[in-house]
Image (cartoon, rainbow, N blue to C red):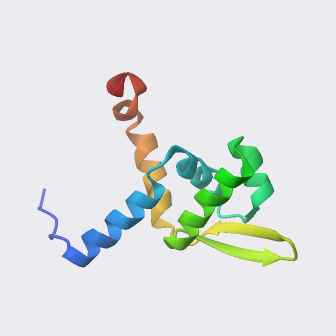
Amino acid sequence: MAQAEPMSDDMLHAAAEVLRAVAHPLRLKILELLEDRRERCVGDIQAYLGARQSATSGQLALLRDRGVLAARRDGVQVFYSVVNPAVLQVLTCIRSHKDCFSRTRYA
């Protein structure tokens, strides 16, 4: 197998920022919900997470500010969707290697 071409420092820094943005259980769960690429309102996301409104809003704001999600306001409601499809590959990778992420390995 040929060795992959080394990534530039700029690319490594950009990738690290995106990975930091998604590196939280609630944020990964948000991405799971939005994986179908449909918009969801904050209330639906909050209900899916089972989290407080303040926690949900904080996680959504971080993902939006880091360019992972887009927000669209319609009246009083805000709808979120994935704008960086590369982050969905993180979920695919986690699922493909779920044995590597078992809780017993990190307990």
Query: In terms of depth relative to the viewer, which is nearer, 77 or 12?
Result: 77
In the displayed structure, does residue 20 sit left or right of residue 83?
left
Residue 92, relative to residue 9: is it above or below? above
Q: Do we see residue 18 in this rendering?
A: yes
Image quadrant of residue 86?
A: bottom left
Q: Do we see residue 8 in this rendering?
A: no
Image quadrant of residue 6?
A: bottom left
User: Residue 94, image x and y in percent?
Assistant: 42, 44
Query: In terms of depth relative to the viewer, which is nearer, 102 or 77?
Result: 77
Residue 43, relative to residue 95: is it above or below? below
In the displayed structure, does residue 12 sit left or right of residue 69?
left
User: Residue 83, image x and y in percent?
Assistant: 57, 72
Identify the residue shown where x is 41% and y is 65%. Answer: 18
User: Residue 66, image x and y in percent?
Assistant: 49, 71
Residue 51, relative to residue 38: is it above or below? above
Identify the residue shown where x is 33% and y is 25%. Answer: 105
Residue 43, relative to residue 84: is it above or below? above
Identify the residue shown where x is 28% and y is 74%. Answer: 11
Query: In terms of depth relative to the viewer, which is nearer, 34 or 24?
Result: 24
Of all residues, the one furthest to the front in this rendering is 54
Quadrant where the C terminus is found in the figure: top left
Identify the residue shown where x is 68% and y is 73%. Answer: 71
Image quadrant of residue 106?
A: top left
User: Residue 17, image x and y in percent?
Assistant: 37, 66
